[in-house]
Amino acid sequence: MAKTTAVNRKPLEGSRILIVDDQLSAQASLERVLEAEGAEVLCVSSVEEARRLVPLAVVDAAVVDYWLPDEVGVEAMRILRSHVEPCATVMITGTQDPSLVRECIAEGAFDVLIKPFELDDFITAVAKAVRRTRTWRATVASTPSAHARDRRFRTHPDPLVTGANSEERTKRQSELDRQARDLARTRKLSKKETTIFIHVVRGLRNLEIAELENIAERTVKFHVANIMTKFGVRSRSDLILLVFFDES
């Protein structure tokens, strides 16, 4: 029997994924795709079912349809975030509405996929969400308050070891800043773009960056959009992952 190696290991092997989708045919299709990539899959069809399941099962990522029969998927995402073992969520929707995408991202969605999407994009998004979940948990798992844990999960995705002292944290943050600057140089970011890129990597929102840099929030949005274009990514989450998992 051949041993599993880094070469033949499936992208989602060893992970548990929750699907929240009321369309049973779509649910079954996504389940087959994820299981083929090595994941254990749990499926529910509503926010209420997700609410009952979440306390009983720890999952590494969730795939949530925006339009559900009882509530919108954002509510399921909130439930997953508030759990003692929070997880990253990939939101899926057939509605091509920029405001809906913005709402999902503002509420903490790791990624948003518009139907119909390519299966390769779907698998990649879920695999990255699993990696993000495991990174976040190292930071937020020991936060005692559910409210504080949720806020930290959304705004401070920093892969610091739980319980690290202030000196270790400072050292780790300096290393992340250095990696961000190195990546900025490779894509020829301007001085201002490099500064904003570092702020994004630290988990700051546009308004917080605007206040720190004394510029308009829409100017920050413009710079962030340019930075994503230069790196060839679709989301702020991807920018953060570029640094967190940079192996250079």
Image (cartoon, grey):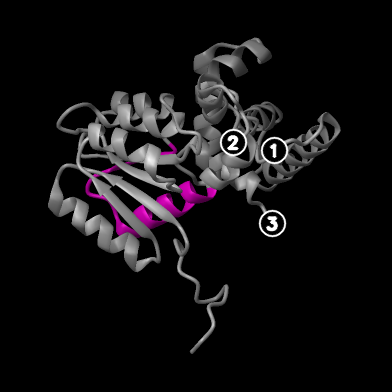
Residue name at image x 53 percent, y 50 percent: 131
Q: The magenta stretch spans which residues?
A: 110-131
Look at the image and say whether residue 61 sits in the magenta stretch.
no
Image position of 165 (left or right of 194): right
Mark 3 touching mark 2, by CB under 8 A?
no
The amino acid pointed to by label 1 is: Thr
- Residue toward you, 175 or 17: 17
- Choose the circle earlier in sequence order: 1 or 3: 1
Image position of 82 (left or right of 215): left
Q: Secondary structure at mark 3?
A: loop
Specify few, some or many for label 1: CA neighbours under 10 Å numbering under 14, 14-19, or 20 or more: some
Query: Marks 1 and 3, how far apart in space?
Result: 22 Å
Look at the image and say whether residue 127 sits in the magenta stretch.
yes
In the rendered image, which residue does mark 1 sit on? 162
In the rendered image, which residue does mark 2 sit on? 141
Give the quarter of the figure containing the C terminus: bottom right
In the rendered image, which residue does mark 3 sit on? 247
- Residue toward you, 188 or 203: 203
Query: Marks 3 and 2, how far apart in space?
Result: 25 Å
Single out the mark in the foreground, 3 or 2: 2
What x and y, as percent, mark residue 235?
Answer: 47, 38
Q: Secondary structure at mark 2?
A: loop
- Choose the circle earlier in sequence order: 1 or 2: 2
Query: Marks 1 and 2, how far apart in space?
Result: 8 Å
Mark 1 touching mark 2, by CB under 8 A?
yes
